[in-house]
Image (cartoon, rainbow, N blue to C red):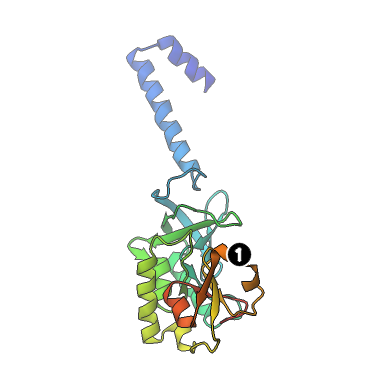
């Protein structure tokens, strides 16, 4: 590379020198694009990132096929976790939608979660994967202070799944607690005795008379106390 640059300097602004310089600039640009597999920390939320997905780890977590082998959490939803009904179905459906495919990601203002994993909305062509999982009853809508870009779409899809009793809604019955507490930051709601409820600071605390109220506002049931 140094020898090439010396040659360009010697040729100055001659046609051959300018041509070689142009090739170097363009090639460097291609290498730079190829290396940008992840979103830089200062990336604007409107940025749309294309990357290849490797496989689904669960209904809401996938592994990306990039140099960093990063994990991505679906924003705006909460899929069943191990031991909950429809965990296997949710994982299988997610994998079928994204496995070995080029996906397009969109982000809210915060594009990483507290563990440093990417947090985004996933599209395969025109298919909005997060929304499909919610519409098919394989995930709950979970809107947080950091993930609400597609909130109305996700809530509408959840209402459709509830009405049709699909997936998790086929097993869910109305709650019997007198009231519930929610965490606005994480988008979960809890039974009052739940250990997670006790950790919610006053400024983030939400109160719900029924579990239906919480669900309709985009809060998902806590995976521990299962309200």
Q: Is 5 located above or below residue 104 in the figure?
A: above
- Residue at the image position 62 percent from the left and 77 percent from the top: 224
Picture residue at 39% right of the left edge, 60% below the top: 149
Task: Characterize the local packing of mark 1: few (<14), some (14-19) or many (20 or more) Cα atoms within 10 angstroms.
Answer: few
Q: Is residue 126 above or below residue 178?
A: above
Identity of the residue drawn at 49% across and 53% down: 110
Position of 24 with respect to 206 (left or right) is: left
Question: Which residue is tagged 1?
Answer: 201
Identify the residue shown where x is 32% and y is 15%: 15
Residue 198 sits above or below residue 146 on the image = below
The spot of residue 56 in percent (x, y) is 52, 66
Residue 135, percent from left and from top: 39, 76
Residue 185's spot in the image, x, y percent?
53, 63
Residue 199 seen in render: yes
Q: Secondary structure at mark 1?
A: loop
The C terminus: image quadrant: bottom right
Residue 193: quarter of image:
bottom right
Number of numbered markers: 1
Closer to us: 20 or 75? 75
Q: Position of residue 53 (x, y in %)?
A: 48, 59
Q: Is residue 138 visible?
A: no
Viewer-proximal residue among 168 and 10: 168
In this rendered view, identify the residue nearer to me: 73 or 201. 201
67 relative position to 134: left or right: right
Farthest-out residue, right: 195
């Amino acid at each position: 590379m140094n020898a090439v640059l010396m040659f360009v300097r010697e040729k100055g602004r001659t046609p051959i020198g300018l041509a070689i310089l142009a090739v170097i600039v363009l090639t460097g640009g291609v290498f730079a694009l190829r290396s940008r597999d992840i979103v830089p920390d200062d990336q604007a939320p409107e940025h749309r990132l294309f990357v290849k997905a490797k496989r689904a780890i669960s209904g809401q977590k996938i592994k990306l096929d990039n140099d960093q082998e990063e994990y991505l959490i679906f924003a705006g939803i909460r899929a069943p976790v191990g031991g909950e009904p429809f965990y296997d179905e949710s994982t299988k459906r997610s994998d079928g939608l994204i496995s070995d495919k080029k996906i397009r990601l969109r982000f809210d203002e915060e594009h990483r979660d507290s563990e440093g994993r990417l947090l985004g909305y996933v599209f395969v062509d025109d298919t909005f994967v997060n929304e499909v999982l919610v519409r098919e009853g394989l995930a709950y809508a979970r809107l947080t202070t950091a993930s609400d870009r597609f909130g109305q779409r996700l809530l509408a899809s959840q209402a459709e799944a509830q009405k049709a009793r699909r997936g998790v809604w086929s097993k869910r019955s109305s709650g019997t607690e007198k009231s519930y507490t929610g965490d606005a930051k994480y988008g979960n709601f809890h039974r009052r005795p739940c250990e997670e409820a006790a950790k919610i600071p006053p400024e983030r605390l939400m109160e719900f008379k029924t579990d239906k109220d919480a669900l309709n506002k985009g809060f998902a049931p806590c995976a521990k106390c299962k309200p």
